[in-house]
Image: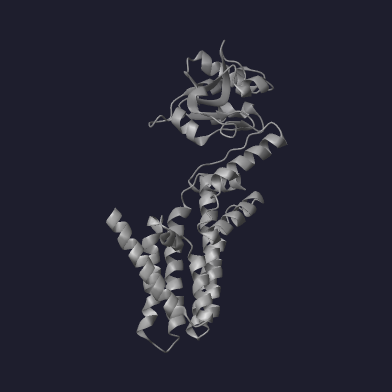
Amino acid sequence: MVAGAMQYRIIEGGTVFQPISTFAALPALVRSDDELIILNDGLLPSPAVLHAVVTTDGPMRPVIIAIPEDDPLAANHPDDFERIDAHRHWAGVLVMRGGPVQQLADFPSDANAISLLLRLTLQDGTPCQEISGQGLEGADWLLAADQGVVKHAEQTLIGKAVDVPDWRAPTHAIAAILVRFLVLRGIVDGWRVTAGLAVAILLCAIGFAVVGYSAAGLLLAVLGAIAAQVSHKQGRSAARLAYDNEPAKKLAILAVTVDAMAALTLLFALAPWPEWQPLAALGPVVIGLVRLASPRAGSRILSLALDRAGLLLLFGIAAAIGLLAEVLACLALGLLSALLLRSGQD
């Protein structure tokens, strides 16, 4: 699913995928001044290491990436990582110019084209770059040799991509666990759907508060906030898995939207339409203080600001027992005091 999403984005950017049935068709498609990146079959390399070795903060350069002869990959899979000199094996990645591709026409059609291109590139004097010093782990440079290896790499990749549950904010921790559950089942790129669901639930919450059902409206807002947290963590995971930063801006807009809708829910929970009372401003004031406190969470009370759904649940319970205004006033005072104390320490 991740690979399909990446291919779709690459095609959107103007790249053309050209399938070929045999390597004999390759010389007709490649010009001598083209640049080629060749990956060994089944290899899943680290994008960060590739970027560091191939581009070195400049244009892409021809290079043969190598590993030492005592590397576990070379020892366990000598046929896949063939030896290129007395002390090194090919690491499965080759960046080259298109010239040697034309020489494939001089070899039998059933020859190993990858191995031929590697040898031709070595003869041309293309430099080798060893990556043993890059601090690679098993999942950073992986040969998908069997199902067990792939499964282990999948778990490692997901472990790095999904947020670690932070129990200072319990509903965030629950959202992180839910996202891990979804990603393990292949549901990676559903953050847009979850974001739409969050906004829809919050609109219903505002509607309930407007007509006087303040507790019900705030409890609905809890569900909307949890859906927004799931969407946020889904988007972050999708970005990490697909190496794409597209969700970041949209998720920032979603966060502002959720806070604005929570503020409206609180406002109407204190003063249903068409009534009005000055205390109704406490709702938007508290949400504003929560937004100020979130980036600076550290103390116990400021950490409360991380958990929007938890706060809305507290407000829903307070509304059910008729103490919403009092709870909001106490929380506003506590947040303001904590912010002032933190500012003084800074």
Name above or below for residue 79 compared with residue 240. above
Q: How many marks?
A: 0
Residue drawn where x is 36% and y is 70% of the image: 333
- Residue 286 x %, y %: 39, 71
Asked whether residue 138 is in view, the answer is yes
**Which one is in front, 313 or 108?**
313
Residue located 42% across and 64% down the image? 256
Q: Please state which of residues 90 and 134 is positioned toward the viewer in this rendering.
A: 134
Q: Residue at x 37, y 86 (%)?
A: 277
Q: Is residue 344 above or below residue 207?
A: above
- On the question of residue 77 being in view, the answer is no
| Residue furthest to the bottom | 274
| Scheme by which the image is coloured | one colour
Image position, residue 342 (x, y; %): 32, 57
Along the viewing direction, whichever of 112 and 81 lies nearer the viewer: 81
In the displayed structure image, the side of residue 7 where residue 252 appears, left or right: left
Query: Which residue extends farthest right?
Result: 147
Foreground pick, 156 / 60: 156
Residue placed farthest to the top in the image?
A: 86
Give the x, y percent position of residue 144.
Answer: 66, 33
Residue 249 position in % (x across, y down): 42, 56
